[in-house]
Amino acid sequence: MPPKIRGNRREPTWRIPVGILGLVVGLGIYALVIAIYLAPVIAGWHALIQAPIYLVLGVIWLLPLGRFLIWMETGRWSAPRQ
């Protein structure tokens, strides 16, 4: 029995390597912006105040990730209808 393939794609597309490179570049830019502009502002604050800020900033980049992964797989920005 052949393995199940989700979706219609059976061969790799250009979107996957471009998407991975875009993700790495985007996360690098996001990290640099945080490190350059925000870190000096909150560096003197108490650690218990800094921790939730960095926690939120560490999770916030995940918000657009779902649609980005859908685009990499299907070429659309929203999930295909069943």
Image: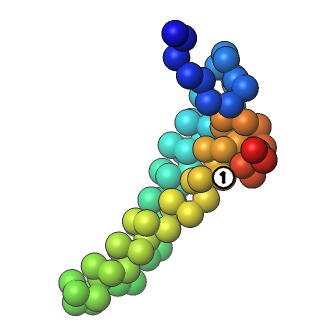
- Say whether residue 47 is left or right of residue 43: left
- Image spot of residue 67 (x, y percent): 66, 52
As drawn, the residue found furthest toward the front would be 1
The residue identified by callout 1 is: 67
Quarter of the figure with residue 25:
top right
Pinpoint residue 75: horizontal percent, then vertical percent. Answer: 76, 37
Front one among 39 and 47:
47
Question: Residue 50, position in %: x, y?
Answer: 30, 82
- Visible residue check, residue 64: yes
Q: Is residue 82 above or below residue 47?
A: above
State whether residue 36 appears in this view.
no
Which residue is pictured at 55% across the width and 44% down the height?
23
**x then y, percent, for residue 66:** 59, 53
Q: Is residue 67 left or right of residue 40?
A: right
Tell me which corner region of the image, top left, top right, bottom left or bottom right, holds residue 41: bottom left
Q: In the image as oriented, which residue stretches furthest toward the top?
A: 1
Residue at position x 52%, y 10% from top?
Answer: 1
| Residue at position x 22%, y 87% in the image | 48
Amino acid type at circle 1 is Arg
Residue nearer the viewer, 53 or 32: 53
Q: Nearer the viewer, residue 19 or 34?
A: 19
Quadrant occupied by the C terminus: top right
Question: On the rendered structure, is 55 left or right of 7?
Answer: left
Q: Residue at coordinates 66% horizontally, 16% vertically from top-left?
A: 11
